[in-house]
Image: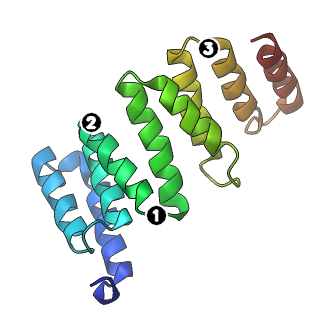
Amino acid sequence: MADAINWGDWERRVAELWAAFDTVDVDAFLARIDALAAELPAGHAIGLFERASAQDSTGNEAKAERLYRQALENGLQGIRRRRATIQLASTLRNLGRADEGVALLNAELTQPADELDDAVVAFLALCLVDTGQAKQAAALALGSLSRHLPRYNRSLKRYAEAVRTDA
């Protein structure tokens, strides 16, 4: 039962497993993620998201897509919802369906700002390149980058807007 879950401990164990990703055998990693997800009630959005992320990170995009969609349908919220949307769009791109990724990420651009804004733009740019919209992709990426430069911010932002208008 979810009430019996010590969320702090569960989150810590998930974070530790992800931190060890590069040192854990793929099958063992997937089994451990599945075991952690199984501690939550069946169909729990967070468990589905963690399983989707694990499948995605180990090259199983088709399985990941199904799990991401289930997690979102089951009410995934907060930063994990945004991560799931970004990751699903990337997965769709890898599956040859970048146009679906563009639609998801364009919708995500209308959401309240957070620390993943640049990730939304970056993956949208990748999807746009795959749909033949390289100029639009460059304009988005340059516009996002312009916020992080120590100098030339306004100039780069204007250039990005010019590229976008030309696209």
Residue positioned 54% across, 63% down in the render: 78
> What is the distance, in whole Å, between disc 1 and disc 3 at their CAs?
32 Å
What residue sits right under mark 1 in the picture? 75
In-front residue for pair 156/51:
51
Q: Residues within 10 Å of mark 3 (few under 14, many from 20)?
A: some
Indicate the amino acid at tag 3. Answer: Gln
On screen, residue 24 versus residue 148, left or right, reads: left
> What is the distance, in whole Å, between disc 1 and disc 2 at their CAs?
21 Å
How far across and down, in percent of the image, does residue 126 sit? 53, 24
In-front residue for pair 47/161:
47
In-front residue for pair 28/51:
51
Residues at discs 1 and 2 in contact (Cβ within 8 Å) = no
Tally the marks: 3
Residue 107, located in which quarter of the rendered image? top right
Residues at discs 3 and 2 in contact (Cβ within 8 Å) = no
Which secondary structure, mark 2? helix
Against 103, is 156 above or below? Answer: above
Against 150, is 11 above or below? Answer: below
Indicate the amino acid at tag 1. Answer: Gly
What residue sits right under mark 2 in the picture? 62
Q: Nearer the viewer, mark 1 or mark 3?
A: 1
Q: Which circle's residue, 3 or 2, is located before the other in the chain?
A: 2
**Quarter the N terminus occupies:** bottom left
How far across and down, in percent of the image, does residue 61 sit? 29, 35
Label number found at residue 133 = 3
